[in-house]
Structures are given as structure tokens and as C-alpha cells.
């Protein structure tokens, strides 16, 4: 099995790790899952609390939580009749923070590139 490069990059030969990373990235592939993970990064909550916070249908939230549990990104703990969901570990919040930071960086970078491309007379 391959080794990880310094800084955390996956070695080309490490197929198993690359597959796991691809699965995690797929989890971030929908807006609803990113929103759910973002809310859970702020603290544990129930499906009902997620529904209220995100304005999504209960069935959609439950479906996405099942997928996120299957991928190992969230955990659920039964408390009486309810299940309280949380991120599996702090790495998930870190990953989400980095993805949001990258998206914001790209958004600002694209605006800066567009502003630089504008003729001064139009500015």
C-alpha cells in the first residue's frame, strides 16, 4: 500500500485512501448535505431541529442523514424517542471549513479577476 505524502496528500498508489477521500467528497456533492453538515458543525441536533434550521422537508433531511451516516460523517445517538445527530469527529468540521474557505476564495478571486479585466474608463 502506498504512503501519504508530507502535508497529507494521498500517494498515487494508495487506492484505498483515494477511494475513501472520493466518498467523502461525494458527500459534499449536494447543497443539502453541505447545509446539514454545516448546521451539525455548530452543535448536535435532532431531525426536527435540522428541518427548522434549514427549511427542508423532514423526509429529505432523514434521507441525507442516512447517507451521511453510511459514509461515516455523522453519528446518531438515541435519546428517548428522538435521535440526536452530530458530526462523527472534528475532522469533518475542518474539512467543511476548508471547503467553504476555498469556495469563498474562488468567489472573491473571480470578482477580482473580473474587476482587473474591466477597462479603467468603465470603472
Image (cartoon, helix red, strand yellow):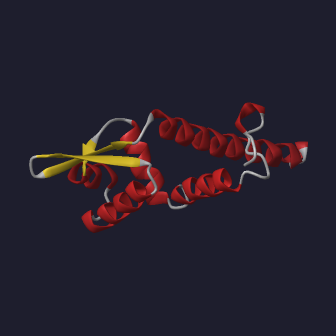
| Residue 44 in sight from this viewpoint | yes
Residue 72: % across, % down: 44, 51
Residue 117: % across, % down: 88, 48
**Relative side of 79 to 12, left or right:** left
**Relative side of 113 to 58, left or right:** right
Is 7 drawn above or below residue 120 in the view shown? above
- Name which residue lies at 38% across and 48% down: 74
Nearer the observer, 39 or 68 = 68
Residue 68: % across, % down: 42, 56
- Name which residue lies at 20% across and 50% down: 83
**Relative side of 83 to 75, left or right:** left
Residue ranking furthest to the front: 1
- Name which residue lies at 51% across and 57% down: 27
Q: Quadrant of the C terminus?
A: top right
Is 1 drawn above or below residue 30 in the view shown? above
Residue 45 placement: quadrant: top left
Residue ranking furthest to the left: 80
Is 62 drawn above or below residue 110 in the view shown? below
- Name which residue lies at 65% across and 50% down: 17
Amino acid at each position: 500500500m502506498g504512503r501519504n505524502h508530507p502535508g497529507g496528500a494521498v500517494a498515487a498508489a494508495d487506492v484505498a485512501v483515494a477511494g475513501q477521500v472520493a466518498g467523502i467528497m461525494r458527500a459534499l456533492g449536494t447543497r443539502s448535505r453541505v447545509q446539514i453538515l454545516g448546521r451539525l458543525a455548530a452543535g448536535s441536533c435532532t431531525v426536527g431541529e435540522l428541518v427548522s434550521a434549514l427549511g427542508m422537508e423532514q423526509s429529505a433531511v432523514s434521507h441525507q442523514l442516512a447517507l451521511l451516516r453510511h459514509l461515516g460523517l455523522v453519528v446518531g445517538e438515541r435519546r428517548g424517542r428522538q435521535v440526536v445527530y452530530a458530526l462523527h469527529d472534528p475532522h469533518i468540521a475542518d474539512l467543511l471549513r476548508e471547503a467553504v474557505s476555498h469556495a469563498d476564495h474562488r468567489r472573491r478571486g473571480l470578482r477580482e479577476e473580473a474587476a482587473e479585466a474591466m477597462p479603467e474608463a468603465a470603472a
